[in-house]
């Protein structure tokens, strides 16, 4: 790598020499052509924006590329953690009530719960609305709606199980 500075306006002069070095640096670390190309472009955009800040060298461009790659990896790590958290929450939110439901008993149980429970359960599970959408329809906060759904599921389960004792 050369450390020859290019004048602030000389980005085009160093571009031809620096491009293979910056791209090669990035590709050797990420092993993805499209990603290396994107990060190389971002590196040269930074150089173009800061061209009035002093000389641009190949070494400086490699430093910018290193930061771009680190930013990419941090962003990717955050996305993966978020996806794992969402997946874990979805698994944890699964209702462990695994038995087959009798449709008529379920309807009777739904009819027997309090109206606010019936409304929340119907909107969420029969109409397929998300919790924030149910909250909006019912004029409640999301947190209050989540609590209402917990109580409603508990009441529905109790009503359903009571209905089975009579059969």
Image (spheres, rainbow, N blue to C red):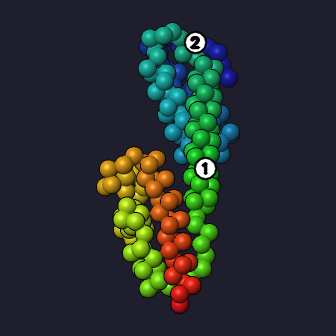
SS class, disc 2: loop
Determine which residue is flagged by label 2: 5
Q: Position of residue 143 (x, y in %)?
A: 46, 47
Can residue 113 be seen by looking at this rendering?
yes
Q: Position of residue 117 (x, y in %)?
A: 41, 63
Question: Total number of numbered labels?
Answer: 2
Q: Residue at x 53, y 90 (%)?
A: 167
Which is more toward the observer, 155 or 98?
A: 155
Residue 22's disc number: none
Q: Is residue 81 above or below residue 154?
A: above
Q: Is residue 33 above or below residue 26?
A: below
Q: Residue at x 31, y 55 (%)?
A: 137
Which is more toward the observer, 20 or 69?
A: 69
Determine which residue is flagged by label 1: 85
Q: Residue at x 61, y 14 (%)?
A: 4
Tell me which corner region of the image, top left, top right, bottom left or bottom right, holds residue 63: top right
Instruction: Looking at the image, tell me whether mark 1 or mark 2 is earlier in sequence order.
Output: 2
Q: Residue at x 47, y 63 (%)?
A: 152
Q: Is residue 145 above or below residue 36?
A: below
Which is more toward the observer, 130 or 122?
A: 122
The 10 Å Cα crowd at callout 1, few under 14, some 14 to 19, many 20 or more, is few
Q: Position of residue 25 (x, y in %)?
A: 65, 33
Can residue 32 be seen by looking at this rendering?
no
């Amino acid at each position: 790598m050369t450390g020859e500075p290019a004048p602030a306006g000389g980005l085009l002069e160093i571009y031809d020499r620096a491009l293979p070095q910056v791209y090669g640096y990035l590709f050797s670390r990420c092993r993805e052509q499209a990603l290396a190309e994107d990060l190389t472009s971002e590196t040269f955009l930074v150089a173009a924006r800061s061209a009035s800040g002093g000389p641009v060298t190949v070494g400086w461009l490699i430093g910018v590329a290193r930061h771009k790659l680190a930013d990419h990896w941090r962003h990717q790590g955050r996305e993966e953690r978020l996806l794992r958290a969402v997946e874990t929450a979805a698994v944890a939110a699964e209702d462990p009530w695994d038995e087959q439901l009798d449709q008529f008993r379920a309807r009777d149980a739904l009819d027997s719960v309090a109206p606010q429970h019936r409304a929340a359960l119907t909107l969420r599970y029969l109409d397929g609305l998300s919790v924030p959408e149910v909250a909006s329809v019912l004029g409640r906060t999301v947190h209050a709606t989540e609590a209402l759904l917990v109580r409603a599921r508990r009441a529905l389960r109790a009503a359903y199980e009571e209905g089975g004792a009579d059969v």
